[in-house]
Amino acid sequence: MSKGLKLLLGSVTALLLGLCSFWVGWLNHTNINQIGVAYNSFGGNVWIQDRPGWYITPPTVKVAYISTLPIKVTVPSNAVVIITKVVRFRPEGVDAFIRQQGFSYFSSSELENILMGYAFSGGTYPFLEIVQDTGQEKVNDRPVQR
């Protein structure tokens, strides 16, 4: 193999390795029905990636994704009365959500379980929209008194 060919193959290999490491370490993609919450572990800065597309972020940034599609949350029960709500995460309330939940929730819990707790707490939250409520529960065709 000639010296020029070795140099060309080495250059192409280095370029491919550089592009792959850039892709893995510096690029992230936010889909159309989600927002990205980026957290820089060095500075502690948090920002929102609210438009779908590719983002360039340093390797020290962890990005978690939150779906903005409606989610059906149900209180698990073996009883006849099942309480169900359809909720949606509101991106404009993500700062309040992070203040209440912290950033570490992304790795340990599912969004559905977290939103279920807030949906049935009786409070109102800037990050939670109740799209549909089951209304008044019935047992044997009679309304349940609360």
Image (tube, rainbow, N blue to C red):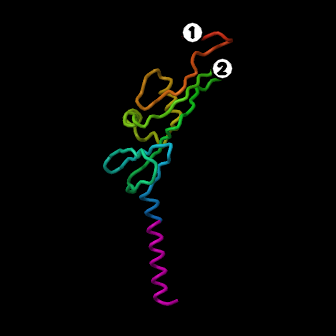
Q: Furthest-right residue in view?
A: 140
Q: Splitting the image into 4 quarters, where does residue 93 fall?
A: top left
Q: Is residue 2 above or below residue 21?
A: below
- Side (left or right) of 79 relative to 123: right
Give the residue type that dot 1 points to: Gln
Residue 71 is a magenta residue: no
Q: Nearer the viewer, residue 10 or 129?
A: 129
Range of magenta residues: 1-19
- Name the residue that disc number 1 marks: 145
Give the residue type that dot 2 points to: Ala
Residue 16 is a magenta residue: yes
The residue that appears at 47% across and 27% down in the rendered structure is 118
Q: Furthest-left residue in view?
A: 43
Q: Nearer the viewer, residue 5 or 92?
A: 92
Picture coordinates of residue 59 (x, y %)?
40, 57
Q: Main secondary structure of the magenta part?
A: helix
Picture coordinates of residue 141 (x, y %)?
67, 11
Picture coordinates of residue 109 (x, y %)?
50, 38
Q: Quadrant of the C terminus?
A: top right
- Classify 10 Å Cα crowding around label 1: few (below 14), some (14-19), many (20 and above): few
Observer-side mark, 1 or 2, equals 1
The residue that appears at 54% across and 34% down in the rendered structure is 70
Q: Splitting the image into 4 quarters, where does residue 77 fall?
A: top right
Q: Is residue 78 above or below residue 22?
A: above
Q: Is residue 2 above or below residue 9?
A: below
- Name the residue that disc number 2 marks: 79
Could you tell which of marks 1 and 2 lies nearer the N-terminus?
2
